[in-house]
Image (spheres, rainbow, N blue to C red):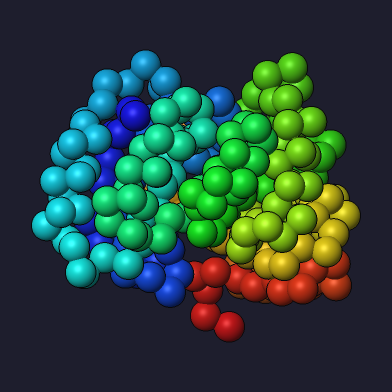
Amino acid sequence: MKICGLLKTTLLDYPGHVACTIFTGGCNMRCPFCHNAELLDINLPSVYSEEDIFAFLDKRAGTLEGVAITGGEPTLHRDLPDFIRKIRERYGLDVKLDSNGIHPEMLEQLIRDKMVDYVAMDIKACPERYAYVSGVTEEKLHFDRITRSKDLLLQGQVPYEFRTTVTGGLNTEEDFHGIARFIEGADAYFLQCFKDSGNIVDKDRGFYEPSKEELLRYRDIVAPHVRRAELRGIDY
């Protein structure tokens, strides 16, 4: 595993759990609003070994309830299933996976083998604008694979959510009409507000934090199509 970051304690990354967050390196997308720009290069060296992580988990036994694995894009790493298996066997912790859906085969394996307890899949935009918002070409996007992952989660074999980082100056109302159709019938959909971390991929595009009113309008577009639609990190 290429492990490039560790957040030792979080109450936010895995809702309902006292968890740690493990950040993998490398991503197939180049979303211009991404706040983890330093994690995108697949050639990044590891900062932590698996044994470093296990030594940390040894010390937090009895305190942590779960592990959130995010990135980058974790499913780019072929040894991810083995890494998760070790965490579950050694510590019995719940595992949440964040993914952009690019590897439906691995996602299916993890669900089938009961290696993940919760999956959060990013939905970048409506299908027609997905490549543009993701910062890649149509050929590199492989939207059919993203659709397969979405359809897999809709089967309900594991608790899941879809989520969109709403970025002012990039996302439009058209996106949310398309997203509503794309994830029709989903259990849960969250809209998260773009925050400029100072380390986003494209610092020159003038992206901004959308207003609460704008976020609520987008939520209301999607809400009739899903069982639950909410803003995350925003006071109503």
Q: Is residue 170 above or below residue 214?
A: above
Residue 44, image x, y percentages: 32, 21
Residue 40, image x, y percentages: 43, 28
| Residue farthest along the bottom direction in this orientation | 236
Q: Is residue 72 above or below residue 70?
A: above
Quadrant containing the N terminus is top left
Q: Is residue 3 above or below residue 87?
A: above
In which quadrant of the rendered view does residue 118 lie?
bottom right
Nearer to me, 230 or 210: 230
Nearer to me, 113 or 59: 113
Quadrant containing the C terminus is bottom right
Nearer to me, 207 or 215: 215
The residue under the point 76% across, 22% down is 138
Q: Is residue 83 above or below residue 16?
A: above
**Relative to 205, is 229 on the left or the right?**
right
**Relative to 192, is 12 on the left or the right?**
left
Residue 15, image x, y percentages: 45, 69
The residue under the point 72% across, 37% down is 146
Asked whether residue 51 appears in the rendered view, the answer is: yes
Asked whether residue 10 appears in the rendered view, the answer is: no
Nearer to me, 232 or 79: 79
The residue under the point 36% across, 38% down is 83
The residue under the point 49% across, 49% down is 115
Residue 215, image x, y percentages: 66, 67
